[in-house]
Image (spheres, rainbow, N blue to C red):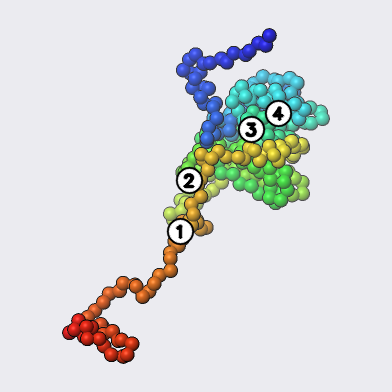
Amino acid sequence: MVKLQRVQRPKTQRGKRALKEREPKLLENARSLLCIRGNKTNNVMKILLKNLHLLKSPHSKMYQRKNLDILPFDSTSKLEWYCQKSDCSLFAFVTTNKKRPNNLVLARLHNHITLDMFEFELNSKTFRSLDDFKCEKFATGNKPCLLFHGELFDNEPDYKRLKCFLTDFFRGEINMKEIDLNGLEHVMTFTIDSQTKLLSIRVYHVELKKSGHRIPRIELNEIGPHIDLTVRRTKLASDDFYKKTLKQPDAIKQKKVKNVTTNELGTKMGRIHMEKQDYNQLQTRKMKGLKRGLITENGQQSEEKRKKID
């Protein structure tokens, strides 16, 4: 006899709100990050994981305990279960061993299934954490400005996907129609060298200074973390699966308006189609002094027209 699994329904209002928050939506919430460490980690990787947690907060959760027997490139089932349990669609996993020292794995999920996964090696000699920069930081939850430098981000397919992944990883809230420029407090730059293929991540604090004009003078001060990464391995989704993730529901698609275009400056331009006009029937302003009698085919004015003119 087959045993049916019962559907556990929430008994409290708090449980109902939690389940409602996890339901599919037309406009999804910001992606949350799950920070996990493996069986063997050194102090540098722990600090790196904590810095990633602070960069993503409040959309981030961190597990403090060690996790045994997790090999992301062999099996991601345990990590996917952790992400589903914590309602996270991103995870960061750090380990270190003799074969792969200072190892960082970043991945994103779609419908609790791993979509893209990248493995990096951290340069521990050049790494500097947030605590190493004694300066003013940005407020938690602020949306950053992302800048990408390097030809590989535009030319090679793997690095194009990496650019999309980093944008999805750090962009924060997406359900925003307008952004206050005064609230733009930090900038993140991603620079990749075409020869060494070294990925450099820098974070700067934006300071608005007086310039004597309406537009303020902007200065950038590095606030950390200072990260240099080298790509080791990648595990990308298939083209069919990736195309499926890009599909949008019909309810949020913008309906195309005919004969309306937008130029480079953002001004809407409309095109109007009109029928051909008959200028003989065009109504114009008439004056008595300009009126003339109509001439017949024989070249003589009709008597009726003469009477009207008189």
- Taking the spot 34% from the left edge, 72% from the top edge, the residue there is 282
Q: Of 150 and 43, which appears nearest the observer?
A: 150
Q: Left or right? Give the position of 179 relative to 49.
A: left
Q: Which mark is residue 181?
A: 2
Q: Secondary structure at mark 1?
A: strand
User: What amino acid type is highlighted by mark number 1?
Assistant: Gly
Q: Secondary structure at mark 3?
A: strand
The answer to whether the residues at label 4 and label 1 have Cβ atoms under 8 Å apart is no
Q: Secondary structure at mark 2?
A: helix
In the rendering, at what x and y percent does residue 132 appear? 62, 34
- Taking the spot 52% from the left edge, 22% from the top edge, the residue there is 18
Which residue extends farthest right? 99
Q: Earlier in the sequence, mark 3 or mark 4?
A: 4
Q: Count residues near mark 1 (Cα–Cα under 10 Å), then give few for <14, some for 14-19, many for 20+.
A: few
Cα gap from disc 4 to disc 1, whole angstroms: 54 Å
Which residue extends farthest top? 1
In the rendering, at what x and y percent does residue 203 appear? 60, 41
Residue tagged 3: 110
Q: Earlier in the sequence, mark 3 or mark 2?
A: 3
Q: Count residues near mark 2 (Cα–Cα under 10 Å), then give few for <14, some for 14-19, many for 20+.
A: few
> Residue 105 occupies which quadrant of the picture?
top right
Q: Of 16 and 212, which appears nearest the observer?
A: 16
The answer to whether the residues at label 1 and label 3 have Cβ atoms under 8 Å apart is no
Q: Earlier in the sequence, mark 1 or mark 3?
A: 3
Residue tagged 4: 94
Q: Earlier in the sequence, mark 4 or mark 1?
A: 4
Q: Secondary structure at mark 4?
A: strand
User: What amino acid type is highlighted by mark number 4?
Assistant: Val
User: What amino acid type is highlighted by mark number 3?
Assistant: His
Cα gap from disc 4 to disc 2, whole angstroms: 35 Å
In the rendering, at what x and y percent does residue 81 appear? 66, 23
Residue tagged 1: 270
